[in-house]
Image: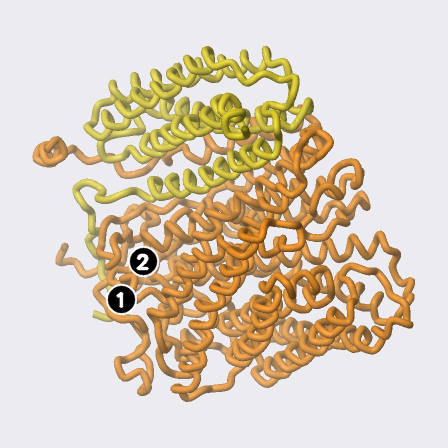
Chain colours: A orange, B yellow
Amino acid sequence: MTTLREPAPTVHERLEHTWRDAPGLVGWLTTVDHKRIGNRYIVTAMIFFLLSGVQALIMRLQLAVPDNTLVDPQTFNELYTMHGTTMIFLFNTPIVAGFGNYILPLQIGTRDMAFPRLNAFSYWVYLFAGIFIYSGYLVDQLPTAGWFAYPPFTGSQFSPDMGMDFWAIGVAFLGVSTTVGGINFIVTTFKLRAPGMSVSRLPLFVWAFLATSFMIVFALPGVTLAAVLLEFDRAFGTHFYNPGGGGLPVLYQHLFWFWGHPEVYILFVPATGVISMIIPVFARRPIVGYLAVAASLVAIAFISFGVWVHHMFATGVPVLVGSFFSAAGLLITIPSGVQIFAWLATLWQGRVRWKSPMLFSVGFLTVFVLGGITGVMVSVIAFDWQATDTYFIVAHFHYVLNGGVVFPMFAALHYWFPKFTGRMFNEPLAQASFWLMFIGFNVAFFPQHILGLWGMPRRVYTYQSELGWDGMNMLSTIGGFVFALGVLVVIANFAWAWKRGAAAGPNPWEADSLEWATTSPPRDYNFLEIPVVGSRNPLWNEDHREGIVTEPEHGGEVLAPAEMEEETLGTAGLDARREAVLPMPEPTYWPIVLAFALTVICVGVLLTNVQLIALGFLGAVGAAIGWFQPHEHGPEPEPEPEQEREQEMA
Amino acid sequence: MSVGEAVAVERVQAALPEGRSLGWWGVVWTITTESVLFALLIMSYLFIAMNHDHWPTEGTHPPELMKVGARSVILLASSIPMEIADKGIQKGSQARLRWGVAGAFLLGLAFIIGHFIEYYELPFHWDTHVYGSLFWTITSFHAAHLIVGLLMLAFVFYGAQRGWYSRRRHTGVKVATLYWHFVDGIWVVVFSTVYLFPHLHPLLKH
């Protein structure tokens, strides 16, 4: 090192200059910053959440009174199909990915995801696929077969217009985004953890994303294939699901639920990761049973693949097969239960602060436990035969998904909003919005259990007054609107706080994980120094009750080279030892170009237009070539010392 | 030393990049998820086939094995020059890289040309019956992967000519090599299912 001491701000300035995006539209289109991409995911997913909410409210209005004529049956079918599709594919999965994108690299103390350009690509694919699925509204041709789109009804014979094509192509296309996102999370967690962040110090949020990403890699091809084969049947006249040509409609159900049940956990496991971060912070003590919780996440990832047939008990599967899947369905409640008891024990032993993220977390616990109990009920075959396709199932999966994913996501929004924006929202208003959402949710969906047991089938657009379902349906509709009011209050609160909220500071919740060690919002390069991690709760003192440490241990790498190259630190092994300095890519147009070229292919398939498909393919190849072109001013390879060569030969 | 006063810091630079590169990890997980896709295709094939008393469906003969057997040997052989290329550049040999990649590319090209000739001669199409749908879809999924592999090899060859790769930097070659081995390896499974299984079906069914 030279004796010349550089002035203090230099490292900061150099990092600033290195990691900055271009201003304006260029920067917006070319950014590969995981924080900007994460923000985009969250905002886009929230827009789809609102669209889906409007669809749900229209359905509730239609069902509020018997013999209603607000919407016709066709429109009603479109509404529940688009509502389900939007919630599963365009809200739940992406918003989870958004939090993962923003928080996970910060939490493991690195500067970006392992593949930042792939990360940008997966956002653009998500956006374009979402627009693709919704563009059915432009030509008024929408899917009507429910979000799982069973053939033969979805074949071209019974669904002749393009609605199903928008759905099948869009869902298959969206799978690309989810898959590369999952791979990105896995490699990021394997290779970019800060030195010292061994597997036993990994935040549970990161464990959850790891388990989820494994499930994505192994399960997602199921839905992709189910949708692709469906589209082949529709567009090219293949016979996969067509009994007339020797095909089997039930094949679709196997492929779909091979993904579909792990998908429930793909959504739910990251949500538990959020809860496992929030509860210890607001209970002011480390989580009870860290190892048991981490092991449960891994166990869920495995068992979730043995559960898919339980969606198909009513299709006449053999008894032995049914019994196996029924047993697996009961077994998976054990690791879920372990987590719930770990959270309860943490609350029990802690000194709880009842702030809004905590309220949403406890709201999740109560709602999800109810959904879990009805889940055990429907995994019993005899009961499932009675309850399937009634409102009991509708109530069950709304308790699981709205309770298990939406409440944790709102907990996460409140928990990390100060980190995202650097500002605090109005806490009393946030608590009011929680109570509106919590009460509204239960008023909306609890009566649906009863309606289901009374025999009200799902997906009916109306009912007769003599059946005696009037009161419960009206109650459910009122609950739906109270819930919606709660959501509007959240949005108003955030909009106000974004502009006028008090400054939050780096760590307003006195939390323990590394994302709180940097500024709010974090600078482009996240950390001035790559932190060195010495414990499971890096920002808490050993006696965590006494307060917090504002900075993690020093001695980390600064990685601000004079050449202004983006760099971060690669680590290896279970104990995350330093391995290499990894160059990081610069902002680039290629991800959006590639995503657009693939969209052109999808439009080509939709219109069965070979020229468009060929054009999209050429565009994709061109974009890939541009993408993988090594950039010119990289450091020249150094001359190779002789002894290394000998080592390699040996 | 507080963070604000951090001074110019020397970079930690290993003599050779240690461990597996990010690209290696990325392609391994890509291969994993693609393998699941193929596994599900194969399971779909067997699921439908075992639900038929006659397979292929009546009026269609089981596929002829001689030509496709020869093509299979060509494809599997293409992994050898690819491996030579990969090992070569790890020792700094540009020549082995170029010749190896070129060899693998040409063998792969020979395979895919034979593949399209076979398509042209087939007596049934994807919309003839479900056997045709499965045959065409599975083999064309594989062909699509192979074409992507060929494009990767062409790209690596171009890069090798421009001198992009060296003993220190050869992630691109590694990625292409792993992917190419995957495309070859998965063919064994596709071949066993699509070409051999129809000959075994009568034994399993009766």
Identity of the residue drawn at 26% across and 53% down = A571
> What's the distance in space between the residues labelled 2 and 1, CA to CA?
9 Å
Same chain for the residues at labels 2 and 1, yes or no? Answer: yes
| Residue A108 x %, y % | 35, 61
| Residue A189 x %, y % | 36, 55
Crowd class of label 2 (few under 14; some 14 to 19; many from 20; radius 10 Å): many
Does A103 sit left or right of A126 as displayed? left
- The quadrant of the image that shows the N terminus of chain A is bottom left
Residue contact between numbered discs 2 and 1, judged by CB atoms under 8 Å: yes
**Would you place residue A357 above or below residue A150 in this image?**
below
Does A618 sit left or right of A188 as displayed? right
Chain at tag 2: A
Is residue A24 shown to the viewer in this render?
A: no
- The quadrant of the image that shows the C terminus of chain A is top left
Identity of the residue drawn at 47% across and 22% down = B196
Q: Secondary structure at mark 1?
A: loop
Amino acid at pointer 1: Val
Identify the residue position indicated by label 2 in the image.
A193
Amino acid at pointer 2: Arg
Choose top left, top right, bottom left or bottom right for residue A638.
top left
Identify the residue position indicated by label 1 in the image.
A533
Residue A632 is marked as none
**Would you place residue A424 above or below residue A351 in this image?**
above
Crowd class of label 1 (few under 14; some 14 to 19; many from 20; radius 10 Å): many
Does B138 sit left or right of A184 as displayed? right
